[in-house]
Image: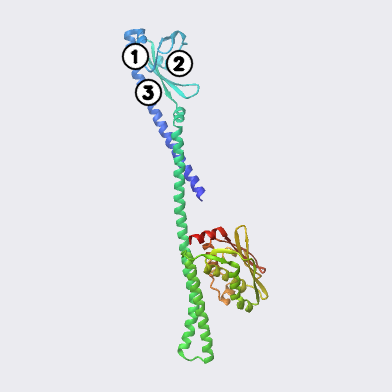
Amino acid sequence: MNKKIFRYSLIISFSLLLVSVTLIMGILYGYFQNQLISELKKEADYIGTAVLTEGISYFDKVNSDERITLIAPDGTVIADTDTDSKNLKNHLDRKEIRLALKNGNGTSVRYSETFMKRTIYYAEKLENGNILRVSAEQYTVITILSRLALPIVIIILLTVLSSAILTAKISKNIIDSEEQKKREIMRREFTSNVSHELKTPLTSISGFAEMLMHGDVENETVVDFSKSIYDESQRMITLVQDILRISELDEKTEFEYEKIDLYDLSENIAERLQPQADKMQVQLRVIGEHCYVYGVRKILDEIIHNLCDNAIKYNHPNGLAEIGIHETDNTVMLSVCDTGIGIAKEEQERIFERFYRVDKARSKAIGGTGLGLSIVKHGAMYHNAQIHIESDIGKGTTITISFPVSECQRYSYSA
């Protein structure tokens, strides 16, 4: 997008510059040419009077910047201020001379061989029939442009610079506007999703509480209702906690960085999740090596915990959930692999969205909030880490997070 805006603004700027220079040069060039012809005419009138009064002897004492030539009606050069008249050819074929003989005066323009200069001739027929011609040189557009090369280059550079600045400002405004729209859409979706997620447990709690309030419920049913109220309350508490975690990451809350052994942390998390894995008949294990990153323990714990939790929940009986840690090329790789239900290709880009669920029915049954992978994404971003996913339906999923060691170290120094 930036390249397009820069290209268009540059084209527009150069087009305006070219049109402006062309118009200005054309107008000024024509104006100065007319001024020069007018001056030549005035000078010819003055010199013509002097030549008629003093005769050819006037040429011996004349002092003028312009070239003055006196020509007979047959084209023979009588006198010239620059060259001996005997060395000059007949001028009857010259345009300005023919026009002067026919109309009383005439003008013509002739260019030098290099086109760097041009000469403007004004000829006027005197009372005695002779033709008086006055000429002056004028720089051509090519000469003017060549002498203006440096200013033109400076103007071009300023044009490019201004186009770049304009592009940056336009791009920033567009990006800001798009970001604002995107945030507004996300805010609306988030509000709608939170309302929906909270409405379900609140409705259940309200219903159970209403029945208990009437007092016509058997003791065994009271226990069941109490358990349901407790489960729904816990679901709400978990949801609120997840929302608060994402808010902290969104607001880039400052946390304390420390040196963390991901292998030890993963083993600790695997031990905590072992009862859940046993219940789901899933083998949970940690492989790899002891690798260290500088990061926030709380966030890294949540990242690994959420990935393992999903690997267990969305697995098959007798399946495998495996946490792998290893280091390569100054990058610590944390991967969580499972042999579960897998994720379709078209859904893999969306699984990190808030409240997005691949299997809505299964998520509801196992009590997921739909925010786990969103927390993983935000936590990885907080550590400047990259996420990569590989998955096949029915075969399983592998999610890998790459922590740049140098980047994590830099965070630790600034913390």
Amino acid residing under circle 1: Ile
Q: Residue 101: image x %, image y %?
A: 40, 14
Instruction: Read off the residue under disc 3.
Output: 36
> Which scheme is used to colour this image of the protein?
rainbow
Choose between 263 and 38: the one closer to the eye: 263
Image spot of residue 30 (x, y percent): 40, 28
x and y percent of residue 162 in the render? 44, 44
Marks 1,3: beta carbons within 8 A: no
Left or right: residue 323 compared with residue 222: right
In-front residue for pair 352/110:
352
SS state under label 3: helix
Q: Which residue is the site of mark 1? A: 47
Q: Earlier in the sequence, mark 1 or mark 2?
A: 1
Mark 1 / mark 3, whichever is N-terminal: 3
Question: Quick one: 165 or 126, which is closer to the camera?
Answer: 165
Q: Identify the mark nearer the N-term, 2 or 3.
A: 3
- Lateral position of residue 318 relative to residue 22, left or right: right
Three-letter amino acid code of the residue under disc 3: Leu
Q: Which residue is mark 2?
A: 94
Q: Is residue 352 visible?
A: no
Give the distance between the C-alpha atoms of the residues marked 1 and 3, in whole angstroms: 16 Å
